[in-house]
Amino acid sequence: MTEFGKALTVTETPIPGLLVVDLPVHGDSRGWFKENWQREKMVAAGLPDFGPVQNNISFNDEVGTTRGIHAEPWDKWVSVATGKIFGAWVDLRAGETFGTVFTTEIDPSRAILVPRGVGNSYQTLEADTAYTYLVNDHWSPDAEYSFLNLADETAAIAWPIPLADVEVSPKDLAHPRLADVTPIGPKKILVLGGAGQLGLALRDAEHVEYTTRDTLDLRADDLATARRWRDYRAIINAAAYTAVDLAETDEGRGDAWSSNVTGVTALARIAAENGITLVHVSSDYVFDGTKAGPYTESDPVRPLGVYGQTKAAGDAVVATVPRHYIVRTSWVIGEGRNFVRTMASLAERGISPRVVGDQIGRLTFTEDLAAAILHLLSTSAPYGVYNVTGGGESRSWADIARAVYRLTGHDPSGVTDVTTTEYFADQAGPVAPRPLNSVLDLGRIQATGWTPRDADAALEAYLAASS
């Protein structure tokens, strides 16, 4: 019999993410009423905002009807409209809790949130039981499923009615034992710009898939169906148009807006529609560099050139995605051609360079940027904007050049300071305006528990590893 008058409560189980929920049911002589899923109240009570997109009902005529054990790649909100079930859940996700079992009875006054990859099964305890479930993805034959035999000896589920005496499908009886089950892996992270400096630094991360424009074009008409997007928990957008001077030309301006805004808009739509966390890498170029101190995440953007304008516009688009991290960084150094390697090469060849001395900032090494991004994702830090650079004292480009000369055993006095205006005075073609102050305040990322590596120490380690 349905229990009336319960308070809305959420109870954890031995299976991580599997939550039992007692529901308020209001009844009188006419029958009863309940809010089977009420997003605002249930999220406030501690349930995740899992975003259901489909509602299914399975009606069962007889006592003892038994179904399962099925693990699917989506979350499921299970309840009954009439009758009662004995439910059994087995964790079939890869990890330490693989094979953990939880059982309980469910009537209309109780529901359960079943996370992706947890095997779901039930046995009806009353005739005319209407079993209902909401899921946050549409059924697909291409999805990754896993199954466990109802009679598995390791799970040892204590079915109220012996399986020999119940209605069960031959298909369910033929599922494998636990030792032969293929565990469901976690949702993947998709990295755009996988061949770039940051993309290469993310190569050692687990459950990461990489793509380039050759394999995924954000401007393609079929983007919405280019992937099973619900299989991804996060997208890291490490791709961008970064030719700051070329962006000031007619052709470059179009390319910059196409990549940094149009493509990002399509990506943001995919993330929002599929409940994906979008990590978008931004730039110090969204600021004009005139502030006296370090820039914080809340400072207004004032880009000077086309590149900075497109990055600021892309940031504004990404900010509309419910789950987003905008990671602003500066002076990025990683694999391939970069300022540090250029200075090391000049030092080796005995060349005394003229280097800009009026632009101030901190180097950011891609391994640190990658670590900060993965930290935000793994700790579920509050969504929003985060500054991420190397730590320590700010330097000019000329200061860094002298450090490279010194650390590679060459005379740093060979580096001559010039102003930005002087440096570009003889350059043919358009020159993008540069922010003179690129120092970013790191307080917010530090508050999440991530400590930036000192940029000077990181430079020394980078050169040592490159020698």
Image: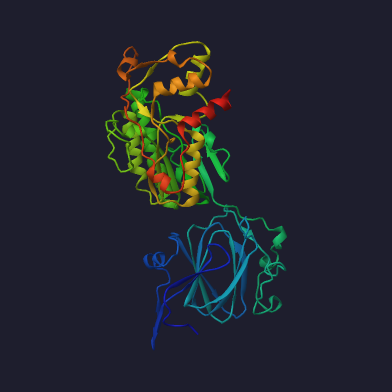
Report whether 294 appears left or right of 175. left
Viewer-side residue, 185 vs 60 = 185
Report whether 83 appears left or right of 183. left
Q: Quadrant of the rendered structure where residue 159 is?
A: bottom right
Viewer-side residue, 306 vs 254 = 306
Viewer can see residue 92: yes
Task: Classify 379 as above or below 426.
Answer: below
**Residue 35 location (% of width, % of height):** 40, 73
Task: Classify 64 as above or below 142.
Answer: below
Viewer can see residue 198: no
**Figure disc tally:** 0
**Residue 98 location (% of width, % of height):** 64, 60
Viewer-side residue, 47 vs 437 = 437
Image quarter where the C terminus lies is top right
Which residue corresponds to the image point at 50% horizontal and 10% vertical from the top-left? 350
Which residue corresponds to the image point at 33% horizontal and 27% vertical from the top-left? 253
Task: Classify 313 as above or below 144.
Answer: above
Q: Residue furthest bottom?
A: 29
**Residue 21 location (% of width, % of height):** 48, 71
Which residue corresponds to the image point at 52% horizontal and 25% vertical from the top-left? 336
Viewer-side residue, 250 vs 222 = 250
